[in-house]
Image (spheres, helix red, strand yellow):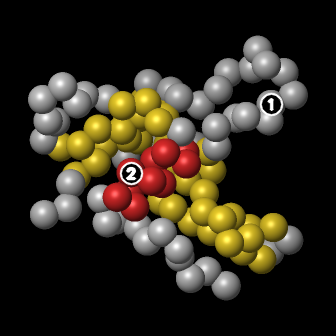
Amino acid sequence: MEPEFRFCLNGEVIRSIRVQPEMSDGKPTGKRQVAVEIEGIGWFTIDDNENLWDEDLPRFVLKYTTIPITTGQGWQRVTTGGLLHVLESAGLITKTPDWR
């Protein structure tokens, strides 16, 4: 049985996430990215904000948990790359997607 995940971005529970191909000039780069949907805003991609021009700008805080929550688990802070790894380990996404 696949685990059921819940996600949180900057303190707000996210209803939908998707893993999609990163695009450059209309073509897939071979990398994956995480997109989230927030009611009233719509879909947008998130990253770890590692290349912000000002270090004082806010960063995305991404967390996940599984249902049912196992003892001592709770919400776990994760990078977008870490979330991709968690979803791979759970068998929900493949390690090497075939996006061409």
Could you say where residue 91 lies in the image, as x and y percent from the top left?
A: 31, 66
Residue named by callout 1: 52
Residue named by callout 2: 86
24 on left or right of 17: right
Which residue is drawn at the image coordinates 80% and 75% (left, top)?
Answer: 26
11 on left or right of 42: left
**52, above or below 98, in the image:** above
5 on left or right of 80: left
**85, above or below 11, in the image:** below
Q: What crowding class fits label 2: few (fewer than 14 Cα within 10 Å), some (14-19), or many (20 or more)? A: some
Examine the image and state in which quarter residue 76 appears. Answer: top left
| Image quadrant containing the C terminus | bottom right
Which amino acid type is marked by label 1? Leu
Between the residue at mark 2 and the residue at mark 1, the CA separation in whole angstroms equals: 25 Å
Could you say where residue 88 lies in the image, as x and y percent from the top left?
A: 40, 61
Q: Can see residue 60?
A: yes
Could you say where residue 5 lies in the image, as x and y percent from the top left?
A: 28, 48
Q: Tell how many labels.
A: 2
**10, above or below 5, in the image:** above
Examine the image and state in which quarter residue 57 appears. Answer: top right
Q: What crowding class fits label 1: few (fewer than 14 Cα within 10 Å), some (14-19), or many (20 or more)? A: few
Which residue is drawn at the image coordinates 59% and 31% (left, top)?
Answer: 60
Kind of element beneath mark 2: helix
Could you say where residue 53 lies in the image, as x and y percent from the top left?
A: 87, 28
Q: Can see residue 42?
A: no
Kind of element beneath mark 1: loop
Task: Say whether disc 2 or disc 1 marks the residue closer to the N-terminus.
Answer: 1
Which residue is drawn at the image coordinates 22% and 52% (left, top)?
Answer: 4
Do the residues bearing badges 2 and 1 touch, measured as CB atoms within 8 Å?
A: no
Which amino acid type is marked by label 2? Val
| Image quadrant containing the N terminus | bottom left
* 8 vs 91, nearest the viewer: 91
